[in-house]
Image: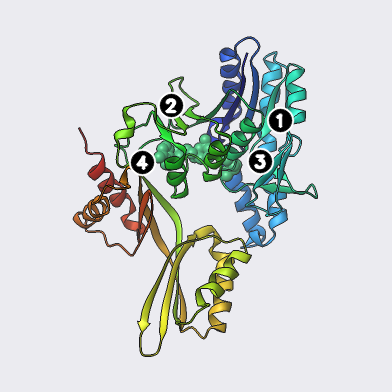
Amino acid sequence: MALIVKKFGGSSVGSTDKILAVAKRILSEKQPGDQIVMVVSAMGDTTDDLIALAKKIDKDPYRFQREMDMLLTTGEQVSIALLTMAFETLGQKAVSLTGPLAGMKTNAVHTKGKIVDIQPQRVLDELAKGNIVVVAGFQGADVKGDPVTLGRGGSDTSAVALAGALKADSCEIFTDVDGVYSADPRMVPDARRMKEITYDEMLEMARLGAGVMQPRSVEMGKYFNMPIHVRSTFTTKPGTMIREAYTMEEKDFVIRGVAHDEKVAKIAVLGVPNNPGIAHSIFSALAAANIDVDMIVQSIRNIEKNVTDMVFTLASDDLPQAKPIVDKVANELNAIAVLVEEDVAKVSIVGAGMLGNPGIAARMFGALSKAQINIDVISTSEISISCLIKSADLKKAANAIHEEFFPKK
Ligand code: ADP
Ligand code: ASP
Ligand code: MG
């Protein structure tokens, strides 16, 4: 007897036929006595469609953050109701629970909420009655009971967090790829599937754009020490295990993968005084609005006049909110101008093996140079190196870097 959490993403439940197929698969694989919790996303592109609807009302609907959450949480509610009906039609007792009913408590940061506590008693009660419990991913409620969503891709986090809180025996993330690859297979056709990857490396891949897992979900896995099995909805092949440490030969890799992020924007604040507190005034204003800043470069514009340029990147989804904030601070600082570039993208390499392995950065830059690709900004962490480039160069860049570290056999 095992308690298993299985998460199915949007493309896995994209139509009623797919929902029925998921229910049939679960029942055919269920062992007697298994307790099953399903976490599901909204059907197909529903979340994008709901955002598009809101944009027809207002061009920046994220100004109405609570209402965006009220809207977006409906997507997952459609899937849980339909999947539960599918189980019942097939003769299996099941019950649907919204995130709040499943005990998902979040902070009050609408559209980017974080889970602060999980009280899954209702889930346990329903399992004890012999139900398959179908939980809406991507959502919880704050102390007031208001709906809060967990950021794009947040159903992954719902699933792993619930698995951890329930002390589940396993947590499986079913998706439209059969595991984690050395690069997004849609961008790099030669990408290879990994049997295993550590939490730390997966977290870095996810933060740098590998959308197969939401970064917070990997943090949850690490926090609860809950291994995560990423696998295909459409085949029964084993996928990729995300866990604390490698168990196999794969630990020999220096570079684990190439990640890319197209949803990046660059802001340059030109000609600000080179005085203490300038960076603080720009970035604290953005932090107060819950906007994450990524790569930051400060460079000297004019030594005599003691002015500097401040360049940074952020998620392009945050740009409409960030731009007026930066404009206001720049104005107060008497900056010369604020420039925005949206046709930029980030390409990164990730691997714990690069620690103490000199020459990795040079190989990455060499691959880009051979492909005639200009690097705009570079940033590094202990286990990654990222380059900001023109969006138009992204596919060529990702493939060139991948070929450098994972040459075709
Ligand atoms: P779901 O709807 O199941 O949550 P997502 O679209 O969020 O699915 O995530 C799966 C997608 O992630 C894949 O189709 C793939 O294009 C993308 N992806 C990005 N990087 C990787 C990677 N390194 N390995 C596998 N898939 C990746
Ligand atoms: N439906 C949400 C999204 O599209 C959550 C998820 O799919 O994980 O971002
Ligand atoms: Mg996803």
Instruction: Measure how far apart labels 3 and 1 are at the Cα level.
Output: 11 Å
93 or 60, which is in the foreground?
93
Tell me, for residue 81, which label it has, or none: 1
Check mark 1 vs ligand 2: CB closer than 8 Å? yes or no: no
Instruction: Measure how far apart labels 3 and 2 are at the Cα level.
Output: 27 Å
274 or 172, which is in the foreground?
274
Instruction: Measure how far apart labels 4 and 1 are at the Cα level.
Output: 35 Å
**Of marks 3 and 4, which one's residue comes earlier in the chain?**
3
Query: Relative to 48, is 43 above or below?
Result: above
Check mark 4 vs ligand 1: CB closer than 8 Å? yes or no: yes
- The kind of residue on which mark 2 rests is Gly
Residue linked to disc 2? 239
Asked which secondary structure carries label 2, the reply is loop
Check mark 3 vs ligand 2: CB closer than 8 Å? yes or no: yes
Residue linked to disc 4? 183
Residue linked to disc 3? 75
- The kind of residue on which mark 3 rests is Gly
